[in-house]
Amino acid sequence: MFTVTVLMVFVAIGMQYYYHNYIYLPGLITKKTDLPKLELNLDVRTWGTYRSHVYFGLRTPHPDSPLFGLIWYEQPRSNVIVPPVRHWCNQNVGIKSYGWTLADGRTFGKQIIHDASFDLATEWINVGHTWTCRIGTSSTIQTKVALIFYFLIQDEASFLHQFDESEQLRSFSGYSQLLGNFTIAFDSNVSMEERSFLAERSLEYPDATNVKETMIAATEVDREHQTLRLPNRFIGTGEGNTKLIAVQLNVLMNSTVEVSFSTDDEEAVTGKMFEEILHRRSDAFIDKFESTFGLAAKGYSGFYQYMGRYALSNMLGSIGFTSGYNRVQSRYSTKESQYGRHELLTSCPSRSTFPRGFLWDEGFHHLLIRKFDPELSLQIIFSWLNTMNVEGWIPREMILSKEDEMLVPSEFLLQKDSIANPPMFFYLIQRFLNDEKFMNTHREAVVGLYPRLRLWHTWLNLTQAGPRPGTYRWHGRNATTQLELNPKTLPSGLDDFPRATHPTDDEYHLDLRCWMATAAKTLEQLAELAGEHTDAVRYAADAQHLANLDLLNSLHWSEEAQRYCDYGLHSTHVELERQTDPKDAHRNPNIPPPPPPPKKRVTREPPRLGFVENTFGYLSLYPVMLQLLPHDSENLRIVLESIRSEKDLWSNYGLRSISTLSPYYKAHNTEHDPPYWRGAIWINVNYLMLSALKHYSSIAGPNQELAFQIYSELRNNLVSNVVREFKRTGYLWESYADDNGHGRGAHPFTGWSSLVLSTMAEQYD
């Protein structure tokens, strides 16, 4: 009997162990927090340009919204071959530039697309639950453009009706479970011979990622008119409802097409009324822009003002809506899971390259958005925080749908709950809290953020703690790779910025410690407003501990190098080298040689635990940028003098990301991985430094004059170069070269690079 009892106890313990470690813990990643959901109060039937990744498209902020979009190409002038077809925003495809000249992210937008030989103008408005858009072509070359307008159903209960032949492709109608009965109408003088259509029947809804390919595959040659056209037929299964209709109009240059969406309850405005509403909203936007940012009052010329409106309009016009599931992996499991369902309203860094939400980018975006439209800013922040799981983790990238996945390399699709991202939202919320006018009208909404921000902070403390009290470490670095010169730290947002060469659990990171100090200070203020006085006392002690200058210096200040540093196992001499096989010298010369082996890292100097001193750059500036140093600090003076050195970070175009004296300056991280945060000028970090310099220059003391001098010169260098490049290329860029100021990387990049507007307006509060 005793043996049976003991056996049963062991079985029970084993079952409990199995459940806890293999079911309960791995399941936490896919369980959303049960904290009260933050209500966005969005009208899910109102249309907007929530399809960031296409040149022009409309939808509502609801998962079941139909999708409207535009595809176009120039009709061939001689040989009838398929020319470049435009749909998804892309780089290096022959389009000279594109972007919103005016857009408020809610009710209207005006965009110019400079294609290879003609310009395309897209204008749109919404009124109630209807919308109208106008597409115009302009060129001195007499040619035709094929405009393909498509309407795609995304839920099983909705459908499109067949065409009424007597209407000659002037309209079609349908039913949406979300929107009710509706009609799409086309107003154009294009003849029937220049109109064509394609419709698809399906038991399910079509894949939005293949719309362009579907159009190309169905396109036929009209021999009589020597043009390309859609086949005027239905495709897909004979059963099921019509889920996709595309209408092609071959339009001449210097003409327009108007498309409108009406419901049984509301008729879309068209013609002169459309023009009047668009004009009123454009004028109101320009007036609000000036009253908010005051560029004209500061004496900026018309072109500077135009670029400022472009920066804001593209940040607002690129706001997107997506829904679906994250592909995730728990730190307690090796299996992939799905986390969701999420519905996310988000801004995006770049329509062409990063048309989805990024956690730390989002915080920077709202330094600008909140100034112009604070309600919209809060709606997006609420949407992001609603994706938090039960432990307080938020995915660093929101890749929720097939459309989101299109531009994501496979190695980045999986999100792991051991991986953090800079908690920039705390820096942002601190700006909310310090804005008395804003808090007078939005106090309740801001206080409502507290429970989720508190949970996020708890998760960060539990999962990103360093080896010593008061230290923090970005988890997720690859300690076994031999292919990287310095293993990347993607969670930090600084990607390939060099850290300790040999990642270990003994390292700790300066920037994360500074972020946590900012978070504690913000939570102290929020807790007081929320009436959580016990929490406020705890966060005050936490903030005071992390802001303790003696402790910060003991952990991160190198007396020898005279700079703030990471700590870890670091070699001062590593190189990428291709190691040849001795047998190659005796290989038969008549046999083609095999592909060369990849370059691997060679450690010339044994690593040692200590400060990472040969990487002076953005990382070393965090105690200054997040304003953790006292205004009269000697270390502040040393850092300011260092960034002003042209051998280190100073350039005529802004602060470069790493010193020219560092061995990592412009160094490839692998033979195929060019430098990213190793010399280029990034607007977001320059903005943080300008904000700090403005702060320190406003306080009387030994560093005031130096801070003001650097602030004035840096601001002038940064703004002048961004404007110069915008005039030269028509784009804001992801980063800028430190040797000639030229734009680099993704473009248009109207995420944090749009902070050039805040810099011109000197708005850092």
Image (cartoon, rainbow, N blue to C red):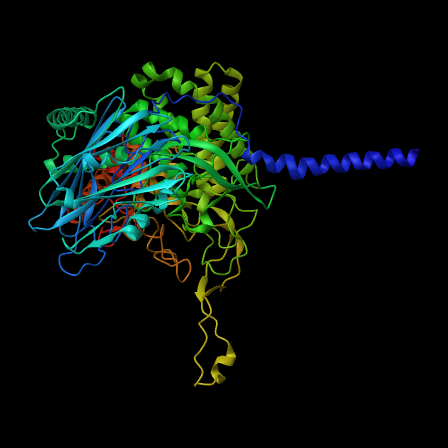
Image coordinates of residue 731 in percent, x first then y, are 21, 45
* Furthest residue toward left: 140
> Residue 302 at what x, y percent from top left?
10, 35
Quarter of the rendering containing residue 754: top left
Residue 287's place in the image compared with 660, above or below, is above
- The picture quadrant where one finds residue 252 is top left
Q: Is residue 558 among what the camera can see?
A: no
Q: Is residue 672 above or below residue 401?
A: below
Residue drawn at (55%, 31%), measured in percent from left and top? 31
* Residue 607 as seen in the image, left or right of residue 332: left
* Front residue of this view, candidates 668 and 748: 748
Q: Is residue 184 among the parts visible in the rendering?
A: yes
| Residue at image point 45% right, 41% down | 510
Q: In which quarter of the image is residue 397?
A: top left
Using residue 330 as the reference point, say whether residue 183 is left or right of it: left
Closer to the camera in the image, 175 or 642? 175
Q: In this view, does 668 lie to the left or right of 417?
A: left
